[in-house]
Each structure stands twice: as C-alpha cells, then as structure tokens.
Amino acid sequence: MRAWAVTRPGPIDGHPLRYVEKPTPRPTADDLVVRVLACGVCRTDLHVAEGDLPIRRDQITPGHEVVGEVVALGADADGFVVGDRVGVAWLRSTDGTCAYCLRGAENLCPASSYTGWDVDGGYAEYTTVPAGFAYRIPDDLDSVAAAPLLCAGIIGYRALKRAGAICGTDDPAVTVPPRLGLYGFGASAHLCAQLAIALGARVHVMTRGSRARELALSLGASSAGDATDSPPEPLDAAITFAPVGELVPVAMRALDRGGVLAIAGIHLSAVPSLDYQRELFYEKEIRSVTANTRADGREFLRLAARHGVTATTHRYPLSDADHALRDLKAGRFDGAAVLVPD
C-alpha cells in the first residue's frame, strides 16, 4: 500500500516525510484493519514530522483523525463487522489496570500508546485500530466532515472541560464558562467554539490570521481580535490552542478573578516567567490537557450531533499530505485539512 513515512524529522519545508510502499496491515488479536476514507491533518502530525515530539518508531506513518471502512478483523475483535465505518483517534491503547485507568483517567495511563506516533496511522491507504478504541461513525455523517471531530473536536472538548465546563456522565448536560476566550483558531478551536456557543458561552477569539478571525465571527463568536489583543470583557476561562508559550501570560492577564486557563496541545514553546501579582493572583489557575479518554470522545460525538457542530474542511489528496502540512504550518487555510484517497 502507499503510505507516508517520517524518514528524517526536521522542518516541514525540508521534506521530512516520504511517500513510500508499506505492507498492507493484517489483523492481529483484537485489531480492525481499516481502509482509509478520510484522514484529518492535525498539528500533532506536524510536531511528529518536525521532531518536536521524539520519534518512537522508525519510519512512522502519521495521522490520527481517521474515518475508514473495516475490511478485516482479528480473532478477538468484537462489536464490529466487515463493512462498518469507524473512527480511529489519537488514543490507541491503555493497560486498563493502572491506578489512572481504574479511576477513569485512562488518558494519563503510563502504558498508553498513540495512533500515528507509536503505531502507523492514517496517512496511508490502510491502518489498524483495536476494536475497543474504535468509534462508530453515524451513517448520516460524511467521512470528510467526521475526520476532524476525532482529534480536533475531542481534544477541544477535553480542553473545554479542563477550562471549567461541567459535564454529566451518561447523556451529557454541559454547563460552560459564560465568558470564554480562545487563543488560536485552527481546527480544534473552531469546533470547540461552536459547541461552547451552542451551550450558551460568549466566545472571544484572539488569533493572528484574518481569515481565522472572519471564520470565528461567522460561527457566532462575540469578538475576534489579534492574538495578543485584550478581549472586550474579563474572561471566566480561556483555552490556548496555538502552541505558543508567549500567549500564556497574555491569556492569564485576560482572566477575571478565579479564572482558569487550559493549555490544549501536546507541544508548547517556552512559557515566559509570570508576574504573580498581574497574572496569577486572585486564585487564577493554569491546567494542561493530556490526550483524552474514550468517554470524552463518545460525549463529544453525541454533543456535536445534537448541536450541529460541523468542521470547515479543505480536501487534499493523500499524495499531497506533505503539502497539507506545509499549508497548516503557514496558516494558509481556516478550519481543518483532510486527506482523501487519490
């Protein structure tokens, strides 16, 4: 099969990925083999390609926002049949027995593994996923539209929870911070904003791109300014999506007393020192976001369907994956890029 592989991590303009031939995967144990119908392009893929994240597997194939069709099953794979359409996300496996898994925090499992980092992902014609970590994709949801929901959407939702949203457990009823700031407005933020607005938040967007600001306003944001602008009102909560540490003190200054900043991202540049009196006093908090649980994923997909959360997408053929990553880094599109078979 055709697949992209990170051959020499480095700046994306230096072509760290190569389009190569790899063996088509065969099912083992509880795995599903999935023919890729669409794969979202995530900033984490860029971090893997450029070496911001250490390479864990030689010649790794990135991609962890995958929608595909099941074409084969391992002997122990339950719950799916050939022909089912499934989603493959970032979190691939956990041990299920550690203290974190047992308390419902499987995203913190020390033995966790990740699609497109530990195991080949969706920048390919085929990929695999353990049956217990696959998501069902509703029949009425287009594959390209669904792909960004599987990481950008789920991680945005996890970040919203870390920023103070309160969610039920079975059929989610979510209460969100009423005044929410989003720093950076790419794939994840534009999905998070839609959900927060639908749930009653006033969303203020701070981002560098004029097209992203236009998209934010078209989706219902109350304001949209430059990345370092002050929002028009103090914030109850904020989320930084841009992997830029210099935005942390900016966001902290924008918070009202008792406000919470959630940092959504697996990689962040250095954070400047904080001025305690101006940026951290009055019981403000900083929280990180680490992957997500499968419960987060199921909750978000239900909420997205209920509230009509939709991704703004830009299609690229699979053979142009490196081009898509270059465009992502340069901020040449709003919303999310999605790879589709040639």
Image (cartoon, grey):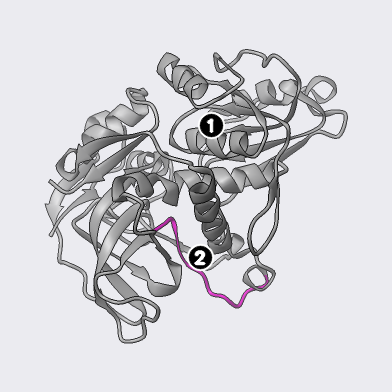
* Residue at 36% across, 85% down: 76
Quadrant, the N terminus: bottom left
Q: Is residue 318 magenta?
A: no
Residue 112: which disc? Answer: 2
* Residue at 52% across, 68% down: 111
Residue flagged by tag 2: what amino acid is it?
Ser
Task: Please name which of the two marks, 1 or 2, marks the residue nearer to the observer.
Answer: 2
Residue on which disc 1 sits: 269
Sequence-wise first label, 1 or 2? 2
Q: Nearer the viewer, residue 279 or 208?
A: 208
Q: Position of residue 30 (x, y in %)?
A: 36, 79
Answer few, some or many: residues within 10 Å of disc 2's Cα (few below 14, many 20 plus, some between 14 and 19).
some
Residue flagged by tag 1: what amino acid is it?
Ser
**Up/down of 209 relative to 280, above or below:** above
Say if mark 1 contacts mark 2, CB within 8 Å. no
Magenta stretch: give its range.
Answer: 88-99
Looking at this rendering, what residue extends furthest in the bottom direction? 75
Q: Nearer the viewer, residue 288 or 53?
A: 288
Residue 107 is left or right of residue 130, and the answer is right
* Residue at 57% across, 46% down: 157
Badge 2 element: loop
Q: Position of residue 128 (x, y in %)?
A: 30, 67
- Mark-to-mark CA distance, 1 and 2: 24 Å
Residue 81 is left or right of residue 43, and the answer is left
Q: Position of residue 179 (x, y in %)?
A: 71, 28
Badge 1 element: loop
Q: Nearer the viewer, residue 191 or 332?
A: 191
